[in-house]
Image: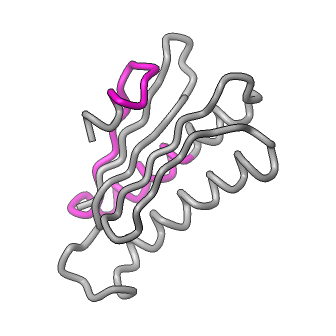
């Protein structure tokens, strides 16, 4: 199962997220469509935040372990926070269709360590 956890600060801004695990641990590599949808949405969000908006962000990922996290740095435009919120909404729509494949949660915090701890 994939777990996605989003950090929401006191102002309601989505500041970071972590995604862990594979949607179907028993699927042969490259055959799990749900995992592909999740990965595609994550990469689209990250590339848009960094390459199009020019936002500095800390990120870490491991394809082998199905582990990805991103934290927006200070000075990012409001659109970057909204993109993370949009990713959360998108993953929640996948969760509605495939509740046994992905779990999405938001927590009130501003630290990535709290997000990773809750994933």
Q: What residue span does the magenta drawing correspond to?
A: 87-114
Residue 5's quadrant in the figure? top left
The answer to whether residue 111 is left or right of residue 98 is: right
Residue 110, magenta (yes or no): yes
x then y, percent, for residue 87: 54, 47
Depicted 111 relative to depicted 72: above or below: above
Considering only vertical position in the picture, is 35 above or below 10?
below
Of 32 and 62, which appears nearest the observer?
A: 62
- Which residue lies at the image location 41% right of the left edge and 68% below the top edge? 63
> Hey, which residue is sitting farthest top in the picture?
10
Nearest to the observer: residue 53 or residue 98: 53
Q: Residue visible at 73% across and 29% down?
A: 76
Residue 44 point in image, percent of width and height: 64, 60
Residue 114: name its quadrant.
top left
Name the residue: 54% across, 29% down: 15
Q: At 62% from the left edge and 52% from the top edge, which residue is drawn?
A: 46
Q: Quadrant of the C terminus?
A: top left
């Amino acid at each position: 199962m994939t777990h996605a956890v989003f950090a929401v600060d006191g102002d309601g801004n989505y500041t970071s997220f972590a995604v862990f695990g594979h949607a179907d641990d028993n699927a042969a590599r490259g055959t799990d469509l749900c995992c592909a949808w999740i990965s595609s949405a994550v990469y689209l969000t990250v590339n848009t935040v960094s390459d199009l908006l020019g936002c500095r962000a800390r990120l870490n990922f491991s394809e082998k372990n199905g582990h990805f996290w991103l934290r927006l740095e200070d000075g990012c435009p409001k659109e970057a926070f909204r993109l993370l919120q949009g990713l959360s909404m998108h993953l929640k729509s996948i969760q509605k269709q495939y509740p046994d494949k992905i779990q999405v949660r938001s927590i009130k915090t501003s630290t990535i360590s709290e997000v990773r701890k809750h994933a």
